[in-house]
């Protein structure tokens, strides 16, 4: 079910539970600002989710309210993970769903990192 990303942050969302260690995940990277882990239902050979450690619902919430340090830390973490996964030369795709029309399902900001094969053109149905 898509979520209304204009609602206040819900600390019972699944990624909040992952950040608190209440639900296991396959972590690929973690630092002060971000956690990156494999998506449970991968849509490409490499499908990693990168999330900020702060409690932000969406890209709108994060870009409007996060500190410069949080924004820099998160963006750097996404780039670091892509580099560490060997995706810079072959290429990769980033995607952040935000709100109902995008079908965002988890109300904690996350960037999908896809790679590991030729992904083809982005398709909108
Ligand atoms: P969204 O549609 O919100 O952009 O994407 C949510 C993503 O979270 C989906 O790709 C889904 O497979 C992934 N996901 C949902 N629950 C879990 C979970 O418990 N663990 C992991 N690793 N991924 C999850």
Image: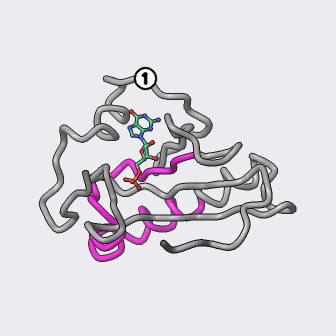
Residue 3 falls left or right of residue 92: left
Report crowding for label 1: few under 14, some 14 to 19, many 20 or more residues within 10 A (C-alpha). Answer: few
Name the residue tied to disc 1.
Answer: 24
Task: Answer above or below: position of 49 versus 56.
Answer: above
Residue 55 location in percent, x, y?
A: 27, 52
In the image, 42 versus 37, the foreground residue is 42
In the image, 31 versus 50, the foreground residue is 50
Asked where in the image residue 71 lies, by quadrant, the reply is bottom left
Say which residue appears at 13% left-offset and 62% top-offset: 7
> How many numbered dots are placed on residues in this image?
1
Q: Label 1, secondary structure: give it.
A: loop
Residue 103 falls left or right of residue 76: left
Say which residue appears at 40% left-offset and 64% top-offset: 97
Say which residue appears at 54% left-offset and 43% top-offset: 36
Q: Which residues are magenta?
A: 48-77
Residue 39 falls left or right of residue 17: right
Q: Quadrant of ligand 1?
A: top left
Say which residue appears at 26% left-offset and 57% top-offset: 2
In the image, 121 versus 85, the foreground residue is 121
Q: Is residue 56 magenta?
A: yes
Q: Is residue 111 magenta?
A: no
Residue 49 location in percent, x, y?
A: 51, 48
Residue 90 location in percent, x, y?
A: 85, 60
């Amino acid at each position: 079910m898509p979520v209304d990303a204009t609602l206040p942050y819900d600390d019972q969302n699944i990624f909040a539970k992952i950040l608190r260690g209440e639900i296991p995940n396959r972590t690929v990277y973690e630092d002060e600002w971000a956690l990156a882990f494999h998506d449970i239902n991968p849509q490409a050979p490499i499908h990693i989710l990168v999330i900020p450690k702060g409690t932000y619902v969406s890209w709108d919430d994060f870009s409007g309210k996060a500190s410069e340090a949080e924004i820099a830390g998160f963006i750097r973490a996404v780039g670091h993970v892509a580099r560490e996964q060997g995706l810079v030369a072959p290429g990769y795709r980033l995607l952040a769903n935000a709100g109902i029309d995008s079908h965002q399902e988890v109300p904690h900001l996350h960037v999908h990192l896809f790679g590991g094969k030729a992904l083809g053109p982005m398709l909108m149905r």
